[in-house]
Image: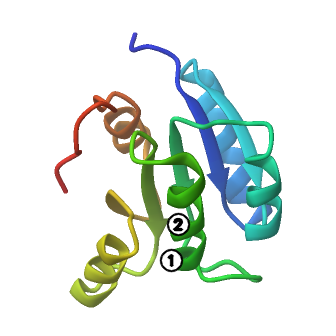
């Protein structure tokens, strides 16, 4: 098993959030879950995630704007992965322009989660 990661999951759909959070914990990772951008920013006050899984369609702020704020607070070693239904080339380009490292299509499966969480966080992750 890979090293345990501290993950911040930002997903506004309660059921999806609960399923992904449970899967993360079953895979041996720590998880703090937030349903809004505001609660995600609040969590960063006392939680330093190594990985942020971020839905782009949040009710209170663009996921891209949240990614920029997370990047400003957490710095480069934090891996930010968009988990979204928005998968057009322009959506992917916009994600990378906003500081997101990976752009993953929903629904995200166990294999994709393992791949993201096994990434070497000391180097840039290939798209």
The residue drawn where x is 64% and y is 45% is 8
Quick check: marks 2 and 1 in contact, CB under 8 Å? yes
In-image side of 50 versus 34 (left or right): left
Quadrant location of the C terminus in the rendered image: bottom left
In-image side of 21 versus 108 (left or right): right
- SS at circle 2: helix
Q: Quadrant of residue 100?
A: bottom left
Q: Which residue is mark 1?
A: 64
Report x, y in % for residue 87.
33, 79
* Most foreground residue, 18 or 125: 125
Q: Disc 2 to disc 1, how far (Cα)?
A: 5 Å
- SS at circle 1: helix
Figure check: 34 above or below 56: above
The residue drawn where x is 60% and y is 37% is 49
Figure check: 90 above or below 112: below
* Most foreground residue, 42 or 1: 42
The residue drawn where x is 28% and y is 86% is 88
* Residue found at the very far top of the displayed protein: 1
* Mark number, residue 37: none
The residue drawn where x is 53% and y is 22% is 27
Q: Which residue is mark 2?
A: 67
In-image side of 14 versus 67 (left or right): right
Count how many numbered circles sit on residues in the image: 2
Quadrant location of the N terminus in the rendered image: top left
């Amino acid at each position: 098993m890979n090293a345990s990661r501290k993950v911040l999951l930002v997903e506004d759909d309660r059921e999806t959030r609960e399923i992904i959070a449970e899967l993360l914990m079953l895979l041996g990772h720590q998880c703090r879950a937030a349903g809004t951008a505001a609660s995600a920013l609040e969590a960063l006050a006392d939680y330093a995630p190594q990985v942020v899984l971020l839905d782009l369609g949040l009710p209170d702020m663009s996921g891209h704007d949240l990614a920029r704020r997370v990047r400003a607070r957490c710095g480069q070693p934090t891996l930010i992965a968009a988990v979204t239904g928005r998968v057009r080339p322009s959506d992917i380009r916009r994600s990378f322009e906003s500081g997101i490292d990976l752009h993953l299509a929903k629904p995200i499966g166990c294999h994709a989660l393992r791949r993201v969480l096994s990434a070497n966080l000391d180097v840039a992750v290939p798209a």
